């Protein structure tokens, strides 16, 4: 079993590329038996490590999704513009300044 843990997405990509290269080597059938077994063992370790990383990512997505489904919403004002009390009057002041012609 592999004790490696993938916390960096780049490391996950590197592990997947290494795994793909091992699979290609094994599928060609040109390796001697001992090298094939060594490559197979490495491939199993990489598979397990990558699967753990995918499981962890899936769990994070699940947690984020559950939070967003249960999050409470706040209604917007009818006109969609924050009131003076919401924005300290800044949004209305900017809007009024833009509406006033320059003299």
Image: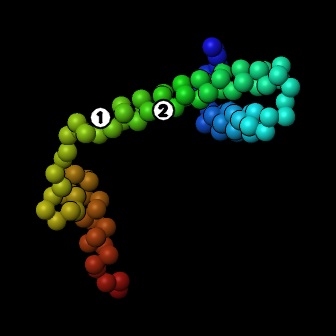
Quarter of the picture containing the C terminus is bottom left
As drawn, the label of residue 54 is none
Residue 91 image offset from top left, x and y in percent: 28, 62
The mark tally for this picture is: 2
| Most foreground residue, 31 or 91 | 31
Question: Is 93 left, or right, of 34 in this rendering?
Answer: left
Q: Secondary structure at mark 1?
A: helix
Question: Is 76 left, or right, of 37 in this rendering?
Answer: left
> Tell me, what colour scheme is on the image?
rainbow
The residue shown at (42%, 29%) is 59
Question: Is 37 left, or right, of 78 in this rendering?
Answer: right
The image shows residue 9, relative to residue 81, as above or below, that is above
Report how far apart the C-alphas of labels 2 and 1 lie in the structure: 14 Å
| Most foreground residue, 37 or 29 | 29
Question: Is 15 left, or right, of 59 in this rendering?
Answer: right
Residue 60 image offset from top left, x and y in percent: 43, 31
Which callout, 2 or 1, points at the residue further toward the start of the chain?
A: 2
Residue on which the image places disc 2: 57
Say which quarter of the image contains residue 48.
Answer: top right
Quarter of the picture containing the N terminus is top right
- Please indicate, yes or no, whether residue 6 appears anywhere in the rendered image: no
Residue 73 image offset from top left, x and y in percent: 20, 45
- Please indicate, yes or no, whether residue 27 appears anywhere in the rendered image: yes
The image shows residue 17, relative to residue 81, as above or below, that is above
As drawn, the label of residue 66 is 1
| Most foreground residue, 12 or 98 | 12
Q: Residue furthest left?
A: 78
Q: Secondary structure at mark 2?
A: helix
């Amino acid at each position: 079993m592999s004790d490696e843990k993938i916390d960096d997405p780049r490391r996950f990509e590197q592990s997947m590329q290494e795994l793909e290269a091992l699979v290609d080597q094994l599928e060609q059938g040109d390796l001697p038996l001992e090298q094939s077994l060594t490559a197979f063992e490495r491939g199993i370790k990489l598979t397990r490590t990558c699967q753990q990383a995918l499981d962890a990512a899936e769990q994070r997505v699940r947690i984020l999704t559950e939070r967003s489904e249960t999050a409470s919403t706040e209604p917007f004002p009818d006109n969609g513009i924050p009131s003076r009390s919401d924005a300290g009057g800044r949004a209305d002041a900017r809007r009024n300044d833009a509406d006033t012609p320059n003299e």
